[in-house]
Image (spheres, coloured by chain):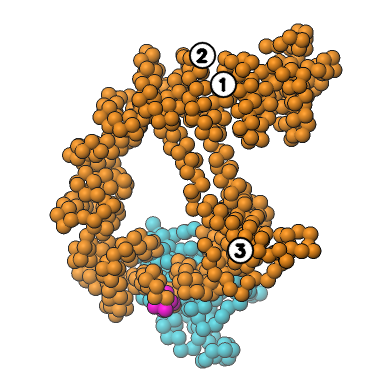
Amino acid sequence: MISEESESGNDTVSLVPANKENVDTLANLNAVLFPITYQKKFYIDCLACGPYTVMAQLNGSIVAAICCRLETHQDLGVRLYIMTLGVLAPYRRRGIANALLGHALRLAQQDPRIVDTYLHVQLGNEEAIAFYRSNGFELIATIKNYYKRIRPADCFVFSCNLRNWQPRNSCLNHA
Amino acid sequence: MMKGDQVLPSKEANLFKQIVKFYETKQYKKGIKAADQILKKFPDHGETLAMKGLTLNCMEKKEEAYEYVLRGLKYDMKSHVCWHVYGLLYRSDRDYRQAIKCYRNALRLDKDNLQILRDLSLLQIQMRDLSGFAETRQQLLMLKPNNRNNWIAFAIAQHLHSSYDLAGKILMAYEGTLEGVPVSERYEHGEMLLYKAMIQEESGALNSALESLDKGSDQIIDVLAAKEARGRLLQQTGNLTGAEAVYRELLEMNPDNYNYHTGLQSSLGTDPGSEITPDQRATLQAAYEDLFEKYPKSTGVKRIPLNFLEGDHFKAAVQSYVTRFLQKGIPSLFSDLSSLYVSTAKADILEKMFEEAVSSLPSSDKLPWCQGETLEEPAVYVWALFYLAQHYNHRGASTKALEKIDAAIAHTPTIIDFYLVKARILNEAGDPKAAAIVADEGRSMDLADRYLNSEATKWWLQADQVESAQDTIALFTKDGDQGNNLHDMQCMWYEVEAGNSHLRCERFGKALKLFKAVAEHFADIQEDQFDFHSYCLRKMTLRTYVKLLRMEEHLHGHRFYCMAAFGLVRAYIGIYDQPIALEGSKSAVSAVSQRRPSATPGSLL
């Protein structure tokens, strides 16, 4: 099922919601994208939280994905946690990650229960840090020894207040 | 209707009529009740006994049915009803030869009975008793010449009997009896005219056929079929200019119909099946450049020249042809081009082209043959790799093929087609187990895709992992009742593949069961034509009907039937060769099937 579609130049980017039929494609993609192998529980969470977790299809092939889950914080309320966001190396630098993030945040904005969104970035991942900053995320904390099996083990926590968030231009049009 | 001492009084006679009605309206219980009422008074009434038997047959009481019908016949040998009923009983058991005998007996007693004649004619055509069929249809026509179907059916009978002249004359005589065609029957009339032209064409009277088409042109509704027939006929009469014009008109309607292309090429003086001279090649090349101007969107117009072009012309054409496939990521490119590989020269050109593309794309983002500044998507590179993998596999270079497909998967691991091709390469390289595992990985990436599921099943069977195959295919059958469901769906590829796997593992009993199932499907398909004998006549789809009859006649030449037949023979031989395994065991099947898989698998077909 294709939820949103746009064409810019030769590119046709469309979003494919993750479901129990195609979840192995998502797992396969993540296995290539990230140094961590995620367990079943990770994907169960993804699917349980509805349409936030999507894959991006470029000219018919799936090349990127964002995985999210909703969490309940006792003081703040419901938060959108972005677990992973990645694009296959050959298909980077064309706004696909931006489109995926935009999709998740826009959905979250429409749900009044959700107050903010946050995520962890590994220390030293400058590309990712710049990406989230440019999308309105702010550094709120540093956690020591967050990762068990990869180095550096520390991470930053970035957060974004959804009430003020503005979408950047993306390769997906919303006419 | 009644004979001699078997005449019923009027009350019972009415009851008997009701039995027939109940039978026709499928109210079997009421029918039995009425029959019993008569039989209480007249226990020896033959026709009632026969009708009761016929009714019982429909209530799945076969043995009783035969008992009653035979008793009925014994009491009333001179009743055509009893013989007819006996025939119907045999017919329902698909014993058509016996049924024909019974009908003939019935007709001896009542020679002009239309119902029995019609039933007999159906059996005769089903059994391909062509001269009998022609006789019966002639009789029916003489009895009822005002019925359209009787004319048409008699013409078909003569046509099938290869009496083309007579068949044509019958249709013309029938046309002569018509006084105008009602609007509601215009389609049927047009079909009849097309059928007449078909008979004439097959008899070799090409000019008469053309004449018929011309004369009927304003009455034929299926204009396309008429035009196609005209093209074919003009071609055969040697009127190439005329044929060319017709094929160009047809291409205007559908520039991607390969039959029209073949027709056009023949009308341009080349035989698409054989070698062509340089002159002919030049003619074709010019013609297709023209067609390309006219139909730039047609894939056929671009693809077909690849068959006849050679050398540099071929190279230029194929380069521009594949570009779109690569840019759009169309997975079928290789299977589209694989027929070109009969020419080693073309295969070499393709190999060089794609190797160059694969080595230049990562650094330049450009296809080496594309001019201009546009940069290609990264996916173009991966689709080129995908093509090369299949190319090397086709040429038997498994190692290179694996290298390419692995590179493609590493580049974009989400494209499922890659996994299927990798499975094929592994299998052809002699590792069916690895192939199955890779195909199953591909399957798991989209559980909603039935094709992937079937592919994975196929590779499990190739690897003789029948249980995994059964579990996989069951995912897409109803309620997990996979055995029956697959049989009902006539899923023959599975039955043949599974049968072969059982053969390889020397489980001959199980193999036998599956191959027999395939043979049964073909018996069913042959049986299924029965309904069409009357249906097609009524609907006047005569050309299709004749094609159906011919298809059924060659049914057992079908690939699946041949594979199953070979399998059956091997299974029987296997069982015969292992008499020791059968001793002391109750069932031959279970004893054989418990044997361990043989150490040397390998294709048996």
Please determine whether, in this image, residue A2 is positioned above or below residue B487: below
Q: Are marks 1 and 2 on the same chain?
A: yes
Q: Residues within 10 Å of mark 2 (few under 14, many from 20)?
A: some
Looking at the image, the residue that sits furthest to the right is: B40
Tag 2 subunit: B
User: What is the spatial separation of the Cα atoms under label 1 and label 2, in whole angstroms?
Assistant: 10 Å
* Disc 1 residue crowd, few under 14, some 14–19, many 20+, Cα 10 Å: many
Displayed quadrant of residue B447: bottom right
Quadrant in the rendering for residue B155: top left
Q: Is residue B370 depicted above or below B192 in this figure? A: below
Q: Residue at x 56, y 38 (%)?
A: B528
- The residue indicated by pointer 2 is B143
Q: Which residue is mark 3?
A: B503
Badge 1 marks a residue whose secondary structure is: helix
Same subunit, tags 2 and 3: yes
Chain seen in orange = B
Where is residue B2 shown, x and y percent of the image?
71, 11
Residue beneath the point at 57% across and 14% down: B112
Query: Which residue carries the number 1 mark?
Result: B117
The type of residue carrying mark 1 is Leu
- Circle 3 sits in a helix, a strand or a loop, which is it? helix
* Mark 2, secondary structure of its residue: helix
Image spot of residue B374 (x, y percent): 24, 69
Do callouts 1 and 2 mark residues in contact (Cβ within 8 Å)? yes
Establish if B155 lies above or below B442: above
**In the image shown, does A56 or B333 lie closer to the viewer?**
B333
Q: Position of residue B341 (x, y in %)?
A: 32, 65
Bounds of the magenta segment: B399-406
